[in-house]
Amino acid sequence: MASTSGRRLAVLSLTALGIVYGDIGTSPLYAIRESLQPAHGLPVSAANVLGVLSCIVWSLIIVISIKYLGYILRADDHGEGGILALASLATPMDTGATRSRRGLVLLGLAGTALLYGDGAITPAISVLSAVEGLAVATPVFTPYVIPITLGILIALFLAQHHGTGRVGGVFGPIVVLWLLTLATLGIAQLIRQPAALAALDPRHAMAFFSANGSRAFIVLGSVFLVVTGGEALYADLGHFGTRPIRLAWFGLALPALLLNYFGQGALLLETPEAIRNPFYLMVPAWALYPVVGLATAATVVASQALISGAYSLTLQAVRLGCLPRMRIEHTSDREKGQIYIPAVNRFLMVACLALVVGFGSSAALASAYGVAVTTTMVITTVLFHAVARTRWGWSRWHAGVLTAAFLAIDLAFFGANLLKIPDGGWFPIAVGSAILALMLIWRRGRRGLAAKLRGRDLPPEAFAASLAHGMPTRVPGVAVFLIREPDVTPPALLHNLKHNRVLHEHVLLLTVVTEGGPTIAAADRVTHRPLGHGMHQVTIRFGYREDQDVPGTLRALTLEGVPPLTQPTYFLARERVVRARRTGTLGPLLPIFAWLNRNAPSASAHFRLPPNRVVELGAQVEL
């Protein structure tokens, strides 16, 4: 048993290396180069090299090893991680809709929206920085760097509809080989110049800030590039669990990254001119092309992890009612988490291609990278404080001191990255702001629409009782009417009865609820209440990470007096939103909500209903 458990832990740790650490593992391609670029006005002197290297080393230790792996990973929502899970933990439902709870929910939505900007930049900067190694090998490739990068990105996005299952098995080995290569290159340089190891002393970082003041603060914006995978690390908690993620980090990822950063520092101590591309200039001439190929493969893996993360994030947001429904394709019969969302894929592809063409180099793209991630990290720390106080019962002093320490570092990185806004940092802020605005418009519009429908419908008990006084014609079979609110009679049922003057022999009023937790226990999945006269009220609950297969759930349900629910007819309402005569819920923003509502796919595909057994009935609602 112990051997089996150990083998499974090893397999999960290997897979975690590919998915969790793909992003942070490719930062050596550009992090030190950007930290000591000539634009900062700092010479590549021994003091500055050791100072920057010390900042990098201690950023990895404090932000990743202590903050995320030591504390943030403990904030799991039934085993799931990510900023939406953290917001769910920080805002328990029994606290009510207080001002503080609404504020925490808004922070969670803002952090979620900003991650889309990161998801667009990461594939662009990662692949571009890898392909730029060809130009280091020979200037002949310089004109072809952009076209090659665009070709790789286009192929990557076009392949998404096949799913990650076919290539997921090689993700881990690729990143393992990449990390071993990083370590080997670093060791080779350290043997020649071991003085770089002095950067382990944090006094070099302190001396760097003391000597350079505001310019050192600006450099923090580039140093931050070494920890940009922290949020992705936390978001993937549900896929692997805490132990494999920690084992992969401390067992291989952290040592390999540190060795490579030390190696680049050793090279710069010996040859300051190597700052133009210290990573590739560490590579022996005979190995340059293989390393470029391996780096490209590693950046594709990192990009795939961010793209898949954007799909998962969107799925969670849709199921929590923060975004309209989208067409979601399940690409694996075994793994429910492997999905493909065409709309998100198109958005990310266009954004990535535009970024590569618009910025033209990974150095220019680095100016846009970091603003969104630092903002999300600050939000994560604030939400973590709320979780520590409300969920774990930490004292105000305990939670406050730890949060203050984390915030001091987060805000330093945040402030340094704000300086990037004029040079490209505006892009992720603009993307995040637009997506957050859509989320808020959608949430407010759906609440207004639900209130409007709730006000015009009958309670289901009253409708069932009325059947005793004027029973309509009943036809054989089972009809399932989907409705958002369990305490109202579905408009689709009333319209069907009004126009067709018939009612099925067995009628299920079905409400599908997405809970705040990621999963729901089987015993709590379905609740049922008979209403009489062949009518039943059924509620199905899913976690926000679960596959919402309504037909499959109904097939397993047995109701007394009701035939097996193998082929019921599903009735859906399709609301068309129009402007109210008076000032409505959304005012001038109504056209945006109406457009989102009109273009959202129907519940049929979302709940995996068989198309040949679905009837949709329209209704017009004033908002």
Image (spheres, helix red, strand yellow):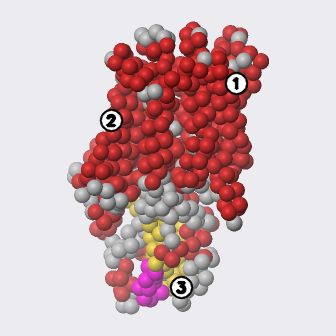
In the rendered view, does 60 fall on the left or right side of 4?
left
Q: Secondary structure at mark 3?
A: loop
Q: What is the x, y in percent for residue 242?
A: 53, 53
Q: How many marks?
A: 3
Q: What is the x, y in percent for residue 589?
A: 32, 44
**Residue where numbered disc 2 is placed:** 408
**Marked residue nearer the N-terminal end (2 or 3):** 2
Write the residue at 32% across / 53% down: 386
Q: Is residue 21 visible?
A: yes
The residue most toward the right is 286
Write the residue at 57% across / 72% down: 553
Q: What is the x, y in percent for residue 30?
A: 55, 23
**Residue where numbered disc 3 is placed:** 559
Q: Secondary structure at mark 2?
A: helix
Of tags 2 and 1, the one toward the viewer is 2
In this view, the residue in front, 542 or 585, is 542
In this view, the residue in front, 259 or 229, is 259
Q: Amino acid at mark 3?
A: Leu
Q: What is the x, y in percent for residue 36?
A: 48, 16
Q: Amino acid at mark 2?
A: Ala
In the rendered view, does 281 fall on the left or right side of 506?
right
**Marked residue nearer the N-terminal end (2 or 1):** 1
On screen, 119 above or below 247?
above
**Residue where numbered disc 1 is placed:** 292
* Magenta span of residues: 528-537
Q: Quadrant of the C terminus?
A: bottom left
Write the residue at 50% across / 56% down: 80
